[in-house]
């Protein structure tokens, strides 16, 4: 079905992400997973197949890619599109219409189908992908997982033979990943060929046939599934891979020494546009705690953290710091949120200037000390946007330390990260905890929760359903929530 | 757009583009502020009929504010400040009708409708695709703005009026830099999603929601054309 022969590709003007001497044959109906560290070139391989290379990303390409008899570099993009469907990482930026019907029709409109034929096809598609309840809805109001389902449907409607997925689970919660898994099994039963580039591996356990391990742009090894399952956990970690079997993940958070409660929230209720989304949350937190906030998309995790920061004004209840009552303005001075997309919070033209941005009399000693501590000192003259994702994140943390923030809130800090980077973030959090900060993390990442957090808040149905510490005693609760067999 | 009733006032994207063109022409031919005010009134009616109530009235109020500031300036100021103020208000005032009409175009047009309209007008693909991506990106700016506002607040460089006046450069930097970074990334991702679904096809693109002119389109086109003629003849 797909044959990649002696392919070497180098992006124009970029040092990283290129691939060298790739040779893979993929049969019809096979499901192949490409994995490896961030920037290893696995996404590049998927782009070779869906035609984005060479049509969209410029660079130097040698070798040949054939899909179902088409030579990709000689076939026009719209013909490739009829054979190869692609789903990308960010559900937010892959739809064009504001209602689901038109969006599902987007691809087949391009194939110039008649209106009646399109209507029939939309009917079939939504039925087969079990998404009737998403019909005739506004896309803006859907959750990330639902948006991605619509993206899938739009491609499925075109009935391609090959599905190419680029990190499809990065922005999804546990339930949405379960749905994604079902969709993939369905496609596999239809004998479609599936290529996935992915960091999160566990949900693919029952679906993949072969696993291609990519390192520094080269195919290092191709495993059959049963051989891959035999690789011990420590070796997977050494390869920069996430766990294939979540049952083997063990808690690793340090239990903090008992201190006096520092931050207290009493009867905290949060509303969004007149709608109550969180009712009566009362909790206290102390120095050195790393508190994971879990729950489905839409359970109010983000709104809660924005309210905690003092950014979301629509709430009741009280907050105390060291026994003193604090209003929104005062909390804003104390809290800092590291956003999922850190680019929104970096403004200056160099790392150095970023750290003193907006401060009247910057303490240059503190700036260089903090940068050294976070391993950023050597980049101090670089532009923040030339840094890698992890470095940007650390820069945002550096800023928070220089601004003397006491409460740090991380929003999905590990989405789309490989094992190494995830562990680095985990170390960073532990280090911050040792510096006596209070840390909140909103996350869907089970491995990260196990590795970093020592306490978990579970939001469900508009309230704080559970609040427990991550130790051997309570770890089962977390397991039950994330591993559904 | 399911029931008949709402369809009566659903105008074709081509009509909206035509109105945008007329707005630009009226502005370039208009000899006094009265014509511009009249034009804004017309666009207000058009926006309301297209069910963009809040946006249309909001923009109209903004325009009233702008005009009153310029009148007050003319009455109470003199010398350089007066010149600066009138240069500013005239400049914004000239662009205002087009911005307002453009907002209505973007806010009420489905991307697929827009593409169908472009097809009917036989526009070349390499103009249509960037414009489509642009129309799709505009609503996302608001989302981005929300995040940027949050991060500015946390950095204590608040986007307040006094903040803008004291540090205009820094405020622009705060908003502009992240917005551009995000825009270039999103535009890339949107385009990739579009080309992998065959937007570059050479076949005639069909449309689930078919577009056609109706009575309302004709009325709008005639009213706006008359207004243009009136402006030129006066």
Image: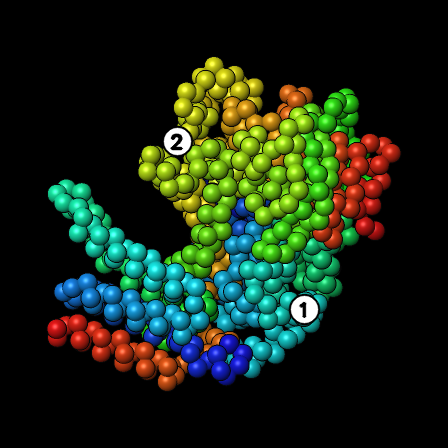
Please, which residue is most extreme toward the top here? A365
Number of marks drawn:
2
Q: Is residue A182 visible?
A: yes
Report the side of B167 relative to B35 (left or right).
Answer: right
Name the spot of residue A419 as percent of width and height, x first: 67, 35
Chain bearing mark 2: A
- The quarter of the picture where residue A194 lies is bottom right
Residue placed under numbered mark 1 in the picture = A133
- Residue displayed at 21% across by 55% down: B71
Q: Is residue A40 visible?
A: no
Name the spot of residue A316 as percent of width and height, x first: 64, 45
Q: Nearer the viewer, residue A409 or A77?
A: A409
Report the side of A375 relative to A266 (left or right).
Answer: left
Whether callout 2 and callout 1 share a subunit is answered yes
Q: How many neighbours does mark 1 have within 10 angstroms: few (below 14), some (14-19), or many (20 or more)?
A: few
Residue A301 position (above or below residue A71): above
Residue A117: mark in rendering: none
Please, which residue is most extreme toward the right here? A473
- Residue displayed at 41% across by 32% down: A348
Q: Are marks 2 and 1 in contact (CB under 8 Å)?
A: no
The N terminus of chain A - image quarter: bottom right
Name the spot of residue B28 as percent of width and height, x first: 18, 64
- Residue displayed at 71% across by 31% down: A285
- The quarter of the picture where residue A470 lies is top right
Residue placed under numbered mark 2 in the picture = A349
């Amino acid at each position: 079905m797909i044959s990649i022969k002696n392919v070497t590709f180098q992006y124009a003007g970029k040092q990283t992400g290129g691939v060298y001497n790739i040779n893979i044959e993929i049969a019809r109906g096979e499901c192949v997973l490409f994995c490896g560290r961030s920037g290893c070139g696995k996404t590049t391989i998927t782009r070779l197949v869906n035609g984005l290379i060479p049509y969209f990303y410029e660079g130097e390409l040698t070798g040949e890619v054939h899909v179902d008899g088409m030579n990709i570099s000689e076939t026009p993009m719209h013909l490739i599109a009829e054979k190869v469907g692609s789903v990308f990482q960010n559900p937010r930026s892959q739809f064009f219409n504001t209602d689901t019907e038109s969006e599902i029709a987007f691809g087949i409109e391009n194939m110039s189908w008649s209106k009646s034929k399109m209507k029939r096809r939309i009917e079939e598609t939504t039925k087969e992908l079990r998404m009737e309840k998403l019909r005739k809805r506004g896309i803006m109001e859907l959750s990330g997982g639902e948006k991605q389902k619509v993206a899938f449907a739009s491609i499925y409607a075109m009935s391609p033979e090959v599905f190419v997925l680029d990190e499809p689970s990065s922005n999804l919660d546990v339930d949405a990943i379960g749905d994604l898994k079902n969709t993939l099994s369905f496609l596999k039963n239809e004998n479609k060929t599936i290529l996935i580039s992915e960091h999160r591996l566990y949900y693919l356990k029952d679906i993949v046939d072969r696993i291609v391990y990519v390192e520094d742009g080269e195919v290092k090894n191709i495993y059959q599934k049963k051989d891959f399952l035999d690789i011990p956990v420590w070796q997977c970690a050494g390869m920069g891979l996430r766990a294939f079997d979540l049952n083997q993940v063990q808690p690793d958070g340090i239990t903090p020494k008992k201190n006096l409660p520092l931050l207290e929230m009493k009867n905290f209720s949060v509303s969004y546009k007149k709608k109550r989304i969180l009712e009566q949350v009362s909790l206290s937190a102390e120095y050195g705690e790393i508190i994971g906030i879990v729950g489905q998309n839409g359970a109010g995790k983000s709104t809660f953290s924005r309210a905690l920061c003092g950014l979301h004004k629509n709430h009741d209840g009280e907050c105390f710091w060291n026994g003193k009552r604090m209003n929104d303005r005062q909390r804003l001075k104390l809290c800092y949120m590291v956003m999922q997309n850190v680019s929104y919070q970096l403004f200056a033209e160099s790392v150095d200037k970023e750290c003193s941005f907006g401060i009247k009399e910057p303490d240059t000693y503190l700036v260089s000390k903090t940068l050294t501590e976070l391993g950023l000192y050597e980049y101090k003259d670089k532009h923040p946007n030339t840094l890698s994702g992890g470095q940007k994140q650390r820069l945002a943390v550096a800023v928070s330390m220089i601004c003397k923030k006491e409460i740090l809130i991380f929003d999905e800090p590990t989405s789309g990260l490989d094992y190494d980077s995830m562990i680095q973030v985990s170390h960073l959090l532990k280090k911050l905890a040792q510096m006596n900060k209070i840390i909140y993390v909103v996350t869907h990442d089970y491995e990260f929760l196990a590795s970093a957090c020592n306490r978990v808040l579970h939001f469900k149905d508009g309230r704080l359903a559970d609040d427990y510490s991550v130790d051997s005693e309570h770890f089962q609760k977390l397991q039950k929530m994330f591993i559904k067999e | 757009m399911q029931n008949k009733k709402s369809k009566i006032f659903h105008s074709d994207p081509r009509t909206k583009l035509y109105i945008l063109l007329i707005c630009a022409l009226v502005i370039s031919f208009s000899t006094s502020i009265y014509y511009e005010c009249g034009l804004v009134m017309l666009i207000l009616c058009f926006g309301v009929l297209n069910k963009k109530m809040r946006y249309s009235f909001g923009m109209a109020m903004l325009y009233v504010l702008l005009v009153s500031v310029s009148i007050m300036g003319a009455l109470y100021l003199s010398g350089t400040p007066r010149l600066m103020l009138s240069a500013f208000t005239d400049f914004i005032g000239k662009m205002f009708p087009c911005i307002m009409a453009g907002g209505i175009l973007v806010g009420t047009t489905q991307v697929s409708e827009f593409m169908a309209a472009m097809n009917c007008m036989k526009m070349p693909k390499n103009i249509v695709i960037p414009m489509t991506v642009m129309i799709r990106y505009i609503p996302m700016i608001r989302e981005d703005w929300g995040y940027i506002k949050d991060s500015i607040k946390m950095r204590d460089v608040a986007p307040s009026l006094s903040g803008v006046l004291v540090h205009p450069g820094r405020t622009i930097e705060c908003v502009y830099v992240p917005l551009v970074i995000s825009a270039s990334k999103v535009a890339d991702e949107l385009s990739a999603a579009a080309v992998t679904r065959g937007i570059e096809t050479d076949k005639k693109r069909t449309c689930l929601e078919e577009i056609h002119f109706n009575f309302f389109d004709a009325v709008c086109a005639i009213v706006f054309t008359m207004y243009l003629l009136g402006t030129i003849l006066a």
